Image (cartoon, rainbow, N blue to C red):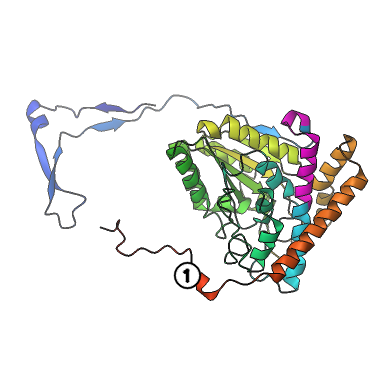
Amino acid sequence: MADQQNEAPDATAEDAATTEKRPSPLSGDGASEEPIEGPWTHQSIDIPEGPIEETVSFDTYPAGQYGHGELGFEDDEVLDLLRNMLLQRRFENRCRQMYQQQKISGFLHLYIGQEAVSTGSANAVDIGEDSIITAYRDHGMGLAMGLTPEECMAELFGKKTGCSKGKGGSMHFFDREKKMMGGHAIVGAHLPLGAGIAFAHKYRGEDNVCLCFFGDGAMHQGAFREACNLAGIYELPIVFVCENNQYAMGTAVDRAFSKPDLFKHGYNFDFPSSLASGMDVFSVNKAIQDHVENYARDDQPSFLEVRTYRYQGHSITDPAEYRAENELDERKSEDAIVRLEKYIVDHDIATQEEIDGMDDEVTQTVKDAIDAADAADFPDEDALYDDIYAQEEYPFIA
């Protein structure tokens, strides 16, 4: 409803000409004054009679609904999808072993079970042109975007050949050329950064978008709502993607949200909002394609919930005893890698023997990455001071 302004009753021309002196709100002592014109006006608010009704719809992308042909993938590209998902799985399995051998220290959050989300998403955007930013469970996204296993493992080992020169570790994978804008450790804190990246794309007149990934737990942070609100106000080219892996650390989603259908929260910001299966790489790819091409590239922010499942605990030290009995076994029957392997065999893209051979190659690739990380040097002590922003006589303070 439009606000209506009405003049105060019995206002005279003499009243209208009068001004009142009041202290400026920018002055601390009241010495500086600015004129405030009168008389004052009052806003009246119209309230419609009867209930207000709205119809809301949400797109869904269930598993098993899409094939590679309609998504534009050639047979060899489907094999590339599987190869990358296998690479992520084998890489993460070896990371667990390296942590147990104390070659990796600090925090370690594995991506096992969520590989279809990273792979389907990365293959729906222009790597090196569009930007992707994510949270601390970032190994899979880095590998999906084309970071090599060698530089990823070296980063985990704290070696200077790592993607963040050995100073970032597990939660801070970066690659400027590929527009991998980080893993970020603080829950929800990177969402405003994602909005800022999208703002930069728009400000520069680029036809690029930002995919901003976060977990279900991050939606409890105020930064989530602030970032979404700003994206809506400024009409930013961003897709907010919630990787709902069912648990925020050890708390199930339905215990933490009064509205556990998280995709519906996007409606609060007038975002087009959708729900996709994270256990099917094709479903994820189709959902991201639609949100990028139909919304983000037209400066319409949107929200996508991708329902997935992590097969490990929250971090390497979490035994995940909060799961229900037999829950993990039931969820493993939905494994996105198994689903894609079956699809490939059923569509005569490759045989099971060829898939097994691919898996062996990937396993060896990860072993080679470990050997390379072992052989690499640690950063020099002076590197501690590299890439730190400092400027004397900072010009914006005055």
Asked if one can make out residue 318 in the rendered structure from this viewpoint, the answer is: no
Residue nearest the observer in this picture, 312 or 111: 111
Rendered location of residue 389, percent (x, y):
42, 62
Quadrant for residue 173, please give it. bottom right
Left or right: 377 with respect to 283?
left
Residue found at x 14% / y 27% = 10
Residue 82: image location, x then y, percent: 79, 45
Which residue is most to the left? Answer: 14
Find residue 320 and report its image quarter. Answer: bottom right
Q: Residues within 10 Å of mark 1 (few under 14, many from 20)?
A: few
Q: At 18% across and 54% down in the image, what residue appears?
A: 27
**Which residues, given as a range, are shown in magenta?**
69-86
146, 279: nearer the viewer: 146
Residue at image mark 1: 385
In the picture, the quarter occupied by the C terminus is bottom left
Front in this rendered view, residue 256 or 246: 246
For mark 1, give the secondary structure: helix
Q: Please say if 311 is above or below 70.
A: below
Residue 36: image location, x then y, percent: 15, 40
Amino acid type, callout 1? Tyr
